[in-house]
Image: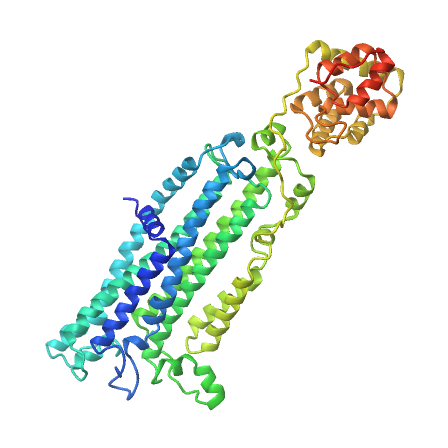
Amino acid sequence: MNLAQHLERAIDKLTLVGAVGIALTISFLLCLFSFFIKIGIYVYNPDIPNKEVGFLSAPNWTIVYMVLFPLYLAFFSTIISSIKAFFNNSVAYPELRVITGPGGVAVDAETVAGAWDIQLKRLSILVLVLFLGVTVSSGLQWFYACFEPFWKARHGVPDFLGGEVWDWSTVPYQRKTQATPEATVIFTGIAYFYMALALFIYLAILAYCAYFASFISRLADDTDRLRLVIRGTEPTNFLAEFFTYVYTLAFLGLCAGYFMRLQASYLSSDRTTIVRYWFSDVRCVLYTQCNSISGLQITASSFTSLLEATYTLIMLAVCIMELARTYSRSKRYYLQKIGDPAWRRTMRIRYDAEFISDLKKESFLRAVIPHYPHLAIPIILMIAAIVFPNVGTLFVLAVLYAAVTLVRGNPNQWNRALPEAEPEDSPHFKPLDISDNDREDIILLLQHQASTIPLSDGFYVNVVDRADIPAEYKNNIKMKLKKSQDPAVALVDATIDQGQNIPQLDVDKKNSTILGSILIALKEQIGLDFQCIVVEKLQKCSLIANQLWLYQLNQQTCGLLPRPYP
């Protein structure tokens, strides 16, 4: 059974408003029922006079499930929508295509979604383990913290707490409150069931995010079916957006762990209200009341909060590592393939020297998380707050710093942090079609010219540099020239191998071939002696599109008007 897929589709069908509405409704009903059965407020610790231990004063039940959990579901719903939009947009339009098949060929959204479903099936194993673990853990906590004290109290056992602390779930068993033990134990069962469900969803969502980060990391690696490709800032923006959501989820999770730890520590302290214990540091500074007993007793809730915080930090670290691998792999693949004209033609992407230069300088942190120092500070403060729960200033500073940082947003996101590698204006360039005889004639012309005019060893390399062609063609041709003993043959063969016409050179030379543009450079630099037969070949093979230049050349050699350029 694909539990991960069921969870994803359930939240997706509920939508953001539906998921948040259901969570708020259940939390409100729990608070309302606790008030009706007299365990919500005015529930005091029998050992410490006026120490409030009611359900409504417990932040691990009220704030966590009334505020944090609905926000958590809202961000998860947003992540699902963002992933679906990314899958659709990454394959729907040629100019936005960042997920491709082998060699850059287009794929449909169903293929990408199918690959993600396979990953969700792998995730379901972990989700099942989490489900069983949370079920057993929550069940044991309820049994030992709620049901066992109820059973012992009912049978007259004097020390029915058995080492547990007084709270809203155990005070009524003394029968000195208006709440009945039977109603209380039933309510605790409902509350702990919802706690287990919420904790399971929380842990599963973080695992979902980590597995998705792993999924796109695999797409950026060598795969047979799909490949993630850098196209301008499209993938970088998505990685930054996804990380922002994951970071927010992790921070909310740490807040939940903090409130669990805060409540557990408060119950074993000498403070009479949660607020007084929460801000013991402030009271110590203002009123010199620094003798509070700070949570000497380790409870199951306190231990769970530490495990939950540790799990959160591990999953956040996994997401960051996988996103970094995604960026590194997709960047490496792009730089390897961008010099291949056939790949660019398939991808409908242009060689952009400025973009490539900037991309080589970019690191993952600069491109995706440029504000990472500001994001690290709230995490560090929150960890310190969990360790010292009664230093409320740490928690307040962490929340304020995180809120300001997230509201300000990623300075690179939605901006052109890197120059856009735009698609070709026309995807219909045809490969250079030249016969062997025409090739031999052009090679003979160049060899004859070289025999009459002494040329330096690097002459053809300099000519290629002067030719009005894109930089990647120049680099490929010059590389072959340097390895060849016959520069004329290497020059012609290298230009033919490029396999496509030059896009958008200028008004006169628009759509000339690579070979034609280099011949123009040779003519202009050394006065290459074009004979009439060569001019005919230039027209027949569609090597040069500059009609004025061909007209003048034809008059000089053949005395004829050139035929229209096909």
Give the quarter of the figure containing the N terminus: top left
- Position of 464 with respect to 256 (left or right) is right
Q: Among all residues in the image, which is located at the extreme right?
A: 453
Position in image of residue 186 (x %, y %) = 18, 69
Q: Is residue 383 above or below residue 13?
A: below
Task: Let me know if residue 456 appears in the view.
Answer: no
Q: How is the image coloured?
A: rainbow
Give the quarter of the figure containing the C terminus: top right
Q: Is residue 370 above or below residue 153?
A: above
Position in image of residue 81 (x %, y %) = 42, 49
For the point 28% across and 57% down, the residue is: 133
Front-lying residue, 345 or 365: 345
For the point 22% across and 65% down, the residue is: 190
Position in image of residue 343 (x %, y %) = 58, 30
Position in image of residue 405 (x %, y %) = 54, 64
For the point 38% across and 67% down, the residue is: 67
- Position of 512 with respect to 232 (left or right) is right
Q: Is residue 335 above or below residue 194?
A: above
